[in-house]
Amino acid sequence: MPAKIIDGKAFAATVRAQVADHVAKLEGDHGITPGLAVVLVGEDPASQVYVRSKGKQTVEVGMKSVEHKLAADTSEADLLKVIDDLNNNTEIHGILVQLPLPKHLDEDLVINSIAPEKDVDGFHISNVGLLGTGQKSMVPCTPLGCLMMLRDHHGSLSGMDAVVIGRSNIVGKPMAQLLLGDSCTVTIAHSRTKDLPDVVRRADIVVAAVGRPEMVPGDWIKPGATVIDVGINRLDAPEKGEGKTKLVGDVRYESCAAVAGAITPVPGGVGPMTIACLLANTVTACCRANGLPEPEGLTA
Ligand code: GUN
């Protein structure tokens, strides 16, 4: 039987609709509008695209969107001042500093200067520690989106064998924590893992987040397993015409889809869920800041 295709684009639309409903309720019942501030330093073209998209979707769900676009040579002190002002601004409930930052800026220092309760990326060390100890935290958006799709497909994940390929702070490590929180038996595999194909073959759930195009072939996948492909890699596609490119994930889609029980495509899988979860985190942060109940189904 061919794998079920997990449609992240459609799922993200339902998450945004839930966020929009909750935003309308906050406005109607309490006169509160959740606010998200995005800080972009420099002119990295990919970051500019992401930031534009975040701003547009924030407004579409009825939230307030603030963008701070700073010059590439902005000093650390000036950037920290912008963050401090946002930390103290009661109309702003979520703050996101777009990464990567220019090289002269200390990313850890900058991220850890965001008030943890407004850290909608979930990158602040306090949130990392809270997640690792199973306490209420802000959860990184991409792993949160993966978790939502897995819960939606499987219901309970309890007792399942999960292998996360990749150990980044943004995806691999928090993903593993979330799966552990849902009572999976979790393995984090990486570039030094011995017998990687055999490790992956044991998994009921495979989350590929290595950033290596089409690294995982179908014969690594246990029949019926669920494959979540976090990779977004742009490759030349001369077969589509001169100068053309295509997006591929970290798994070989056709061969994995032939074996898996369910799989996320690239594009249209995990990607759209990331911004949807950013909006979800912002509404969650706003509810917490105001002592109001959090939206159900939009948190870990
Ligand atoms: N750059 C690429 N992805 C992300 C993300 O999820 N958050 C931030 N802040 N920067 C990014």
Image: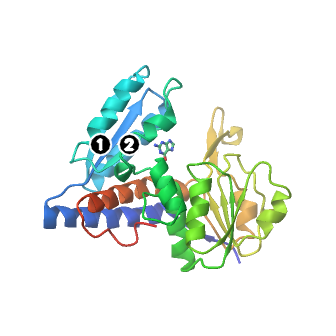
Relative horizontal placement of residue 243, taking residue 98 as reference (left or right): right
* In the image: residue 154, left or right of residue 130: right
Q: Is residue 41 visible?
A: yes
Residue drawn 50% across and 26% down?
A: 102
Q: Amino acid at mark 2?
A: Ile
Residue at the spot 55% in from the left edge and 75% down from the top edge:
153
Earlier sequence position, callout 1 versus callout 2: 1
Disc 2 target residue: 114
Nearer to the camera, 4 or 291: 291
Q: Mark 1 touching mark 2, by CB under 8 A? A: yes
- Residue 102 or 230: which is nearer the viewer? 102
Q: Which amino acid lies under the numbered mark 1 shown in the image of this protein?
A: Asn
Q: Where residue 289 sits in the image (x, y, percent)?
A: 26, 58
Residue ID at (60%, 79%): 158
Task: Say which element carries label 1.
Answer: helix
Question: Residue 107, image x and y in percent?
Answer: 50, 35
**Within 8 Å: ligand 1 and the Cβ of disc 1?**
no
Give the labeled residue for mark 1.
87
**Where residue 268 appears, x then y in whole percent?**
53, 57
In this rendering, the count of numbered labels is 2
* Above-or-below relation of 44 to 239: above
Q: What secondary structure is marked by label 2?
A: loop
